[in-house]
Image (spheres, rainbow, N blue to C red):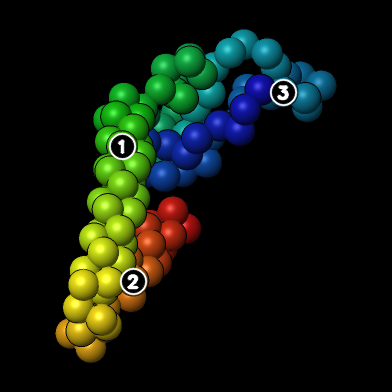
Amino acid sequence: MNTLKPCPFCGGEARLPIGMDGNPVDYEVTDCTCKSDDCPIAGYWIPIKIWQTRPIEDTLNKRIARLEEKLAELVEVGNKMRDLIEQDYDGYLDETIDWRGMAEEADDVLQEREE
């Protein structure tokens, strides 16, 4: 089984039910270990399939992936445009616009998001 995601409400650790012998029982349910009154699902056993489903998070992750692909395409187009312009203006833009530097900064921002 994959690692259980944290609680969607409080971030608490998920746990599996423990049997009389002290080992996890395969009931396909989990709950949040936070025991907080602020967590609406603390103490309730939730089916793992539902626990692991995060439709909003999954949708946002897919959207981020698509946007990162588009950004990479735009950076590539921008670099090609810069190369073409440099050929025409003999390095004029190196002093005015640092396209590669801007692309590297955008890439750094994306890498920070992934961390």
Quadrant in which the N terminus is drawn: top right
**Pair 1/2: label in front:** 2
Choose top left, top right, bottom left or bottom right for residue 23.
top right
Asked if residue 60 can be seen in this view, the reply is no
Choose top left, top right, bottom left or bottom right for residue 11.
top left
**Pair 3/2: label in front:** 2
Q: Residue at x 42, y 17 (%)?
A: 50
Q: Label 1 vs label 2: CA separation? A: 22 Å
- Label drawn at residue 24: 3
Judged from the image, the secondary structure of the residue bearing numbered disc 1 is helix
**Pair 3/1: label in front:** 1
Residue marked by disc 2 = 100
Q: Position of residue 70 (x, y in %)?
A: 28, 43
User: What amino acid type should be assigned to the residue bearing mark 1?
Assistant: Arg
Judged from the image, the secondary structure of the residue bearing numbered disc 2 is helix
Q: Position of residue 61 (x, y in %)?
A: 35, 37
CB contact under 8 Å: marks 1 and 2: no
Residue marked by disc 1 = 66
Precedes in sequence: disc 1 or disc 2: 1
